[in-house]
Amino acid sequence: MLLLKNGTYIDWQTLEFKQSDILVKEGDAGSIRFVDGYDAQWEKAHVIDCTGKFITKSFANGHHHVYSALACGMPAPKKNPENFLEILNYIWWNLDKALDLEMIRSSALVTAMACAKNGVTFVIDHHASPNAVDGSLETIAQAFDEIGVGHLLCYEISDRDGSDIARKGLEETEKYLSKRQGLVGLHASFTVGDETLKQAVQLARQMNSGIHIHVAEDTSDQDQCIAKCRKRVVERLHDAGVLQFPKTILAHCIHLDDHERALVERSPAWVVQNMESNLNNSVGFFNSIGLGPRIMFGTDGMHSDMLRSAKSAFFAGHNFDAIGYGETYRRFRNVHHYLHSNGFSGDGENNLVIFDYDSPTPVTADNFFGHFLFGMESKQITHVISKGRCIVEEKNIVNVDEDQIWAISRKQALRLWSQMKK
């Protein structure tokens, strides 16, 4: 049990400001309670002094890639990529093929630590490791559990490495979903054949889940679909049943026509915007027009800072998207609505961040959006509470030895980079 003393609580939905002590109870179904006065039971609580600090709901990431965690600083690829398909071939598909379970565990641990320090207590991840499929999802889950970060995982099933690995992806998914919450992952339409797509949709229906897939991130996805299937990507996914699930996540959705946008809007599926990744890959700019209100933010493996992701979407979106102050915050928080509406656990009200935000100007409900976009930063987060337990205290990870994990991850990165050269 935690007792947060003397802080200013900001309700993440109403933006109401409240001065109160807060009692935080542990567990997936834990809660917070505003308290006043003294109660003998509080003597057993862990007390955090929040004087002069702000408390609000922690953050969640709508689309991440654990497998990219050891990429920072890696040697240049054999060929300088000239387009999106070459970026995949020479960088990411070369990297994910080199992963083994030890590398995956290190990737998951450092990702979970980075998320925690940035106030992110829940991650929706899309994983790929074609030569280490079996056990990969459970390896990630255990690492996230160790840090204390909630998760909704999937394996990126694809035919790009052959039917045998596609089958392993389906088997890994079914095995994982039989014991943990998760999604059925697919890479993208252009690497998924009709039979694999059919089996994935059947598995999602069987496991009461949904599909998590990259959609029209680049024009090449549309070009291949039109050439092979004589229809556009979203039309193909709609016809296959992907859009029927309210748990389905469509990542990117950049190169869509008006008909595809209408199909998405009329469906219960959710869209994830990944602005910085799109900018980095030069694939285009996200435009929300016609997609409906179910849009949330992700980082696509670029980093684990959701405040940074929101700011990038706002700044870059001025000339390409109908996005303003309130809409940016709405998309930033939409991931909580996705998780809650679909009955996923681990993102309750007892997930909190404490900000030491010493603003030179007043912070109120009326001007909160201005502070959210132009003042508040992840480096100001001092404490992070996940499922009622403190996982970051005074900016330090509580549950593990950070230095030891960093030391191991650096060795695993060198192993990975060496494998990638073969």
Image (spheres, rainbow, N blue to C red):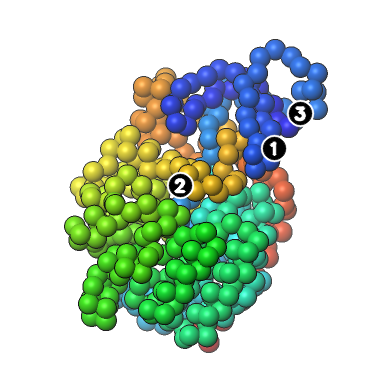
Badge 2 density bin: few <14, some 14–19, many ≥20, Cα 10 Å: many
Question: Label 2 belongs to which residue?
Answer: 338
Q: Which mark is residue 45?
A: 3
The image quarter in which residue 363 lies: top left
Badge 3 density bin: few <14, some 14–19, many ≥20, Cα 10 Å: some
Q: Secondary structure at mark 3?
A: loop
Disc 1 to disc 2, C-alpha distance: 22 Å
> Which amino acid is tagged 2?
Tyr
Badge 1 density bin: few <14, some 14–19, many ≥20, Cα 10 Å: some
Disc 1 to disc 3, C-alpha distance: 11 Å
Question: Label 1 belongs to which residue?
Answer: 26
Residue at horizontal 35%, vertical 72%? Answer: 189
> Which amino acid is tagged 3?
Ala
Q: Secondary structure at mark 1?
A: loop
Disc 3 to disc 2, C-alpha distance: 32 Å
Q: Is residue 277 visible?
A: no
